[in-house]
Amino acid sequence: MNNIALGRYIPLDSPLHKLDPRAKIVAMFALLIAIFIDTGFSGYAILGVIILIGVLLAKLQFNFIWKAMKPMLFMLVFLLVINLLVIKTGYVLLTIGPLTIYSDAVFQTLYITIRLILMINITTLLTATTKPMDLTIAIEDLLSPLKVIGVPAHDIAMMISIALRFIPTLLEESQRILKAQASRGVDLEQGSLKEKVTAILSLIVPLFVSSFQKADDLADAMEARGYDPGNKRVRYRQLKMRGNDYFLMIFCNVILAGMIVMKVYL
């Protein structure tokens, strides 16, 4: 479990850990929106510096951030290959036999890669510095105005928090199944396409079975503790916004406004 970083809470004594989870969620969404505003590499550099400061303030090790990004490496390589084969605009950078690499393919891949890395780092900062229960309470509070139109805020918050809670669990379970299959001679890297598909199915099927079993166990445990989403709930822990929380939200929204200005006028 220590090798899994995505969706994992790290109990540390840092300024980010002490912030209100509602402020961190609002700040995260502001930065995520800013990422999708095309301001070029200069805008991404500004966001990268802000995220780096956040990592330092959270006292997280860079090795932990790297572990969170490792599951996305395959997707990044896949995007690179697809872009090199599909995008045929811009000037020619390199020709290798029948394959011609264009500048737009490389730049488009860099843009996507940088955006994914920034998004993963932002979400990792949130989950690593916020307890799952606090995250549930914060999401429910932020969605509470939608209750007037019949939106089940508590149910949505509970589903999101459980999904985040199960990310490291499923990753750990997949690693356990891979080791078990490897001990039986199953190899996902070698063999024909049919053999690779069969090997992947040998991973997916037990993973689904294990996931459903864990979901049933969780449902039974919640029911045994008297959980009823329809009843009004009381909280022992009450969230309270402080000056640092307002500063974080204002700062990140100023960054978002700055990205919009850069997009419009630069």
Image (tube, rainbow, N blue to C red):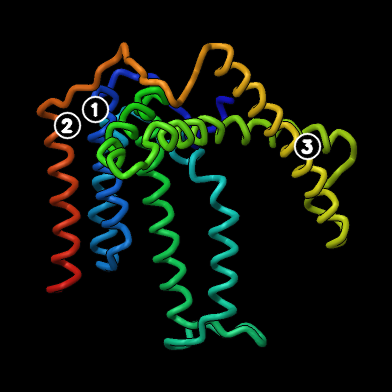
Distance of mark 3 from mark 1, alpha carbons? 39 Å
- First of labels 1, 2 by sequence position: 1
Q: Position of residue 27 (x, y in %)?
A: 24, 42
Q: In which quadrant of the rendered view does residue 202 lie?
A: top right
Q: Which residue is mark 1?
A: 20
Is residue 231 shown left or right of residue 42? Answer: right
Amino acid at pointer 1: Asp
Is residue 112 shown left or right of residue 254? Answer: right
Q: Are marks 1 and 2 in contact (CB under 8 Å)?
A: yes
For the residue pair 202 and 5, the one nearer the viewer reads as 202
Say the numbered circle drawn on residue 245.
2
Q: Position of residue 196 (x, y in %)?
A: 82, 55
Q: Which residue is mark 3?
A: 206
Helix, strand or loop at disc 3? helix
Helix, strand or loop at disc 2? helix
Distance of mark 1 from mark 2, alpha carbons? 6 Å
Amino acid at pointer 2: Asp
Helix, strand or loop at disc 1? loop
* Crowding near the residue tagged with mark 3, few <14, some 14–19, many ≥20 C-alpha atoms within 10 Å: some
